[in-house]
Image: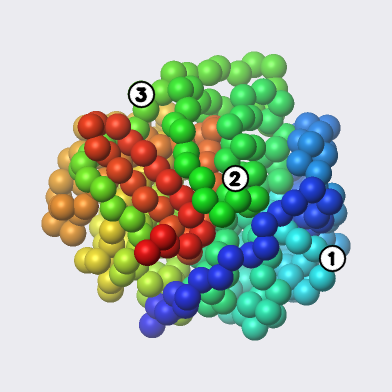
Amino acid sequence: MPGTSPTSFVPRRLAPGDTLRVIAPSCSRSFVMEHDNTRWINERFDALGLRVQFGDHVDERDEVDSSSIDSRLEDLHAAFADPEVNGIMSVIGGFNANELLPYLNWELIAANPKVFCGYSDITVLANAIYSKAGLITYVGAHWSSFGMRDHFEPTGQWFRQATHELSWSVEHHHEFTDDLWFMDQDQREVHPTQGPWILNPGKSSGRVIGGNLGTLRLLQGGEFMPELAGAFLFLEDDSATNIDEFARSLASLLHMPGAERIRGLAIGRFQFASQISRSLLELIVAKHPVLAGIPVVANLDFGHTSPMFTLPIGGWAQLDTTDGKVRLDFAHQSAS
């Protein structure tokens, strides 16, 4: 049975002087350090007033650029258990964070609520922790994301809002990048954005669930999946996904119990390599009766392009497309 998505509670907001523990639930930090961008990472966390430290096993690296389940669990549990640690952040994503799920100490996590943030493969941990422990988590920038020398903002601003404030609004950015920036910080191309695509107009609010769609699907049918009834789904996918894969993944999610009572759907910007267009998305969305009558927007600033806003998993979102404009507000607790 899916998780029951218990009543959520908000981790203490980050503040200057706090300690951030960086762990590697998926890929190793040594994988990231093949392109060393720590100068800009350090500058940005210094500016936030956050003291960064690392789990004992972040540099362990096996044949698949990760480490053992035991090593990754030890670092995650140690970060939650340490009273000096105020926030936890992933080094980067990967492919195997779901290996940790059966062995996580949910009681330990619930008893030591703190900010937990990462995206892509970290989607499984963020949603499972909310589902099993009731802790609001964050699908947003990795530690390594802060190494982007240019065009990083407003990603950093959105991370600060989500982890430092109780409510905030997202102003959609006017440009984006879609590149392997960490390999070459000097040769980058900036693209204008068309802004949000309103596929179904409307106004609604609901509990935030989602992140990377291909990763979220790993939770389907199991005890770690959050309840979908009353959820506002935020979904994105990476360059490996084409319209066929996205369509069947979305359909699979919408077949889940409770999906008939979702409150809205927000889709992040696709990478160029996916070749997913607005017209293709309109076709896919129109197929599903469960999506009729609820707001659906796409091409939003989250996912595998930059900039990316931070999602509060288990928190609340309100979407309003009145007058053809998209207003997106987040809060850690419902206003009702």
Of helix, strand and loop, which one carries label 3?
loop
Q: CA separation, marks 3 and 1?
A: 44 Å
Amino acid type indicated by mark 2:
Gln
Q: Which residue is mark 1?
A: 84
Determine if residue 209 is in view. Answer: no
- Location of residue 60 (image quadrant): bottom right
Query: What residue would you read off at disc 2?
Result: 161
Residue at the spot x=27%, y=39% of the render? 321
Q: Secondary structure at mark 1?
A: loop
Height in image: 44 above or below 312?
above
Question: In the visual, does 94 lie left or right of 211?
Answer: right
For mark 2, give the secondary structure: helix
Tag of residue 197:
none
Residue visible at 56% across and 70% down? 9
Residue topped by disc 3: 194
Q: Which quadrant of the figure contains the N terminus?
A: bottom left
Label 3: how many Cα within 10 Å (few below 14, some 14–19, many 20+): few
Q: Amino acid at mark 1?
A: Glu
- Side of 285 relative to 31 (left or right): left
Decide which of tag 3 and tag 1 comes sooner along the chain. 1
Q: Position of residue 69 (x, y in %)?
A: 70, 70
Residue 296: x %, y % from top left: 27, 46
